[in-house]
Image (spheres, coloured by chain):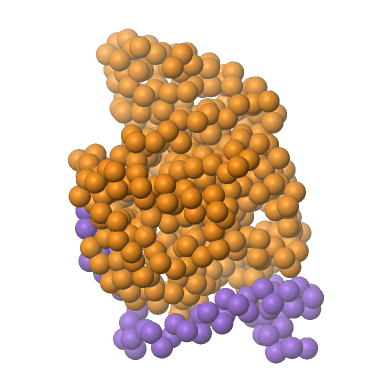
Amino acid sequence: VTDPCELSLTEAAQAIRDRNLSSLELTQGLLSRIEKWQPALNAFVRVEGDSALAQARAADEALGRGQNRGPLHGVPLAHKDMYYYKGKLAECGSRIRKGWIAPATSTAIERLLGAGSFSLGALHMAEFAYGPTGHNFHLGPARNPWNPQHITGGSSSGSGAAVAARLTPAALGSDTGGSIRGPAHYCGISGLKPSTARVSRANAMPLSFTLDTVGPLARTAEDCGLILSVIAGPDPLDPTTEGAPTWDQAAASRPARGMTVGVPTRFYVDDLEAEVAAAMDATIATLKRLGVKIVSVDLPDQMQVSAAASVVIAVEAATAHAPWLRTRAEEYGPQVRARLQNGLAFTGVQYLEALRWRGPALAAYLEAIGEVDVVLAPTIRSAAPTITESDVGAEPRGDAVLGAVTRFMRPMNYLGLPSLVVPAGRSAAGLPIGLQLMGRPFGDETVVALGTAFQHETDHHKRLPVLS
Amino acid sequence: MPEGVERVLANARAAGVTLEAKTAERIANSIAPIEAQLLKTPAQVEFEHEPATYIVVQRAGAKR
């Protein structure tokens, strides 16, 4: 590889550490690509070029003095515009937070900065992270690097587009109902929704207090593991992380041989486009070659799980937004306003029934999968639709369109399980298809290990979109 | 006015948000399939169960 922008995060960090690549060269290369691709993709909401170049020079000078700040020393990264940096804008894809300056820095960002990375800028997102397609009423849609007429998925739309187009080696997204995994699937990259309680959400914009997760989008499963190794672990500012395990790199590097992978017999295999079904079949064959044992799993009713997730998200989002729904409702885009209003309609009993069922639902799921390490499932039933056909605004048909996008992803949020999307095929039109590797509780390292082994055997993650 | 719409209007009013009737009707139609699914859950949950029990199940289910 001669273009440093085409290196994976792991490779770029290693090359800088070994002084085979300077942080300045990488940063200049990325800024040059951003300038070229941004008009076509709308992936960034802010680019911090001068600041990034200054920090790249400082990183190179520090390394010259023998000072290595950590595993991401000298690596520029851009993140979804919902991660707060003290004293900087965080507009959350919205009009309501236009011009809002964050009073504190997100724990996840603090840890990435502490590991030696620095900011390239902020990325496009769905308004308040409440939309799975990549449309944004205020900012216009983010566009898919594989074909700008198609959606990126959302809500981490800019993260998906920017990583796929090699404008940043990796990006934080957030996943409450599929917002990391959808863009990873549609944009042909890897994306990890971590286990509930694994990564602090402190000073990141909330959508659903119960179901929000913070995680990476990157080229490879290994890159996702590298980001998790930096950001995972307890944080006093997010009490849900107390007692959660820290990253176990040995577990994330284990071989696939001897693992057991479950393939669902229903729900996840219903109504798939033929190309997605073919990707499932091909992936099962690859996993068998890796020495993985494949078994069928008969999961409990996942439609019910998905419905419970919908109630929790709707009510918690409406609660967080209630002050603005009372006084500034006209400042939301029509679709986000309509979805937030839905959450006002559920009763307290319905919300608590949905919340109370979470433990029993997880217990039933775990009983169904037995000793299985990872369940293989599609992410979404098809490759990316066009921006036009998925632009449903607040129309009644929107429920069906948006529901089809999130259908296979919401259960993992409700059950709190880790799920890694890896590129696994492409459609006849050349658009990417990704599959989910869904782990056990706190089994983030296992899905990364399996994803890494899969990517050593395949080259879907190496394909590169070309700007025409 | 259908019962579901009246309930949506009342719940929104209780939250301090005023909705138009047509908005309430849209919401009632939108959430009806979710409510139907949710009705299946209460019978599956033990009387003594409380939400934080999820954490116990999560930690017990870990196999790393």
Q: Position of residue A249 (x, y in %)?
A: 23, 40
Task: Specify the quadrant that holds the C terminus of chain A.
Answer: top right
Q: Position of residue A135 (x, y in %)?
A: 68, 48
Q: Confirm whether residue A357 shows in the render.
A: yes
Q: Residue at x 61, y 35 (%)?
A: A146
Q: Position of residue B64 (x, y in %)?
A: 22, 53
Count the marks.
0
**Quarter where residue A359 is shown:** bottom left
**Quarter where residue A46 is shown:** top right
Which hue belongs to chain A?
orange
Which hue belongs to chain B?
purple
- Examine the rendered structure and indicate whether residue A437 appears above or below residue A25: below
- Examine the rendered structure and indicate whether residue A46 appears above or below residue B56: above
Q: Residue at x 50, y 31 (%)?
A: A463
- Examine the rendered structure and indicate whether residue A161 appears above or below residue B7: above
A172 or A318: which is nearer to us?
Answer: A172
Residue A124 appears left or right of A296: right
Q: Residue at x 74, y 78 (%)?
A: B25
